Image (tube, rainbow, N blue to C red):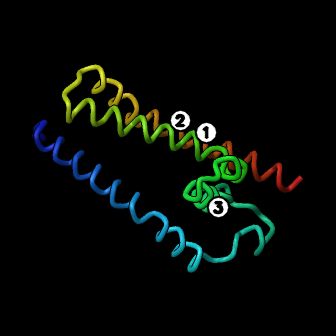
């Protein structure tokens, strides 16, 4: 059985990883640009559902949020969801706030994740149709 102490250590480890990735984020984006293949749209005329996500993250790292929003609007929705998930996860299990534990359980429930995946899928299909028309 998993104890609360083990969960706290796992969450603190996740926080540490997020801080490390945040500190080296700009280098990761540069590596992605260097080794990323040509866009699917340029190769075969069909846009990928996440087209613009890399440019969006790059624009955010540069501080140009308006340009980032133009590249990929759904990224901001996903970023807010992940940020709130991390905040409630820390409040619930590290600081032992009961309400936050309930919110975290709902946010990480498989139905919630499936709904977000479906929204992303619909968003990608809509973007493809807009680009192709």
Crowding at label 2, few (<14), some or many (≥20) Cα neighbours within 10 Å? few
Residue at 40 percent of width and 57 percent of height:
22
Labels 2 and 3: the sequence-earlier one:
3
x and y, in percent, of residue 15 in the image? 29, 49
Please report contact status of discs 2 and 3: CB closer than 8 Å, yes or no: no
Residue at 30 percent of width and 25 percent of height:
100
Count of numbered tags: 3
- The Cα atoms of the two marked residues, 1 and 3, are separated by 21 Å
- Residue pointed to by mark 3: 55
- Residue pointed to by mark 1: 119
x and y, in percent, of residue 19 in the image? 34, 55
- The Cα atoms of the two marked residues, 1 and 2, are separated by 6 Å
Crowding at label 1, few (<14), some or many (≥20) Cα neighbours within 10 Å? few
- Residue pointed to by mark 2: 115
Residue at 23 percent of width and 24 percent of height:
97
Residue at 39 percent of width and 61 percent of height:
23
Labels 1 and 3: the sequence-earlier one:
3
Question: Residue 73 falls in which quadrant of the image?
Answer: top right
């Amino acid at each position: 059985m998993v104890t609360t102490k083990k969960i706290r250590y796992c969450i603190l480890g996740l926080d540490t990883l997020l801080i490390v990735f945040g500190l080296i984020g700009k280098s990761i984006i540069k590596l992605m640009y260097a080794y990323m293949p040509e866009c699917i749209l340029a190769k075969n005329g069909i846009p990928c559902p996440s087209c613009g996500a890399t440019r969006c993250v790059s624009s955010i790292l540069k501080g140009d949020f308006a340009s980032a929003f133009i590249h990929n609007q759904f990224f901001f929705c996903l970023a807010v969801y992940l940020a709130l998930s991390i905040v409630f996860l820390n409040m619930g299990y590290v600081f032992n706030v009961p309400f936050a534990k309930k919110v975290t359980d709902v946010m990480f429930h498989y139905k919630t994740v499936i709904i977000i995946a479906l929204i992303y899928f619909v968003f990608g299909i809509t973007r493809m149709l807009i680009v192709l028309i």
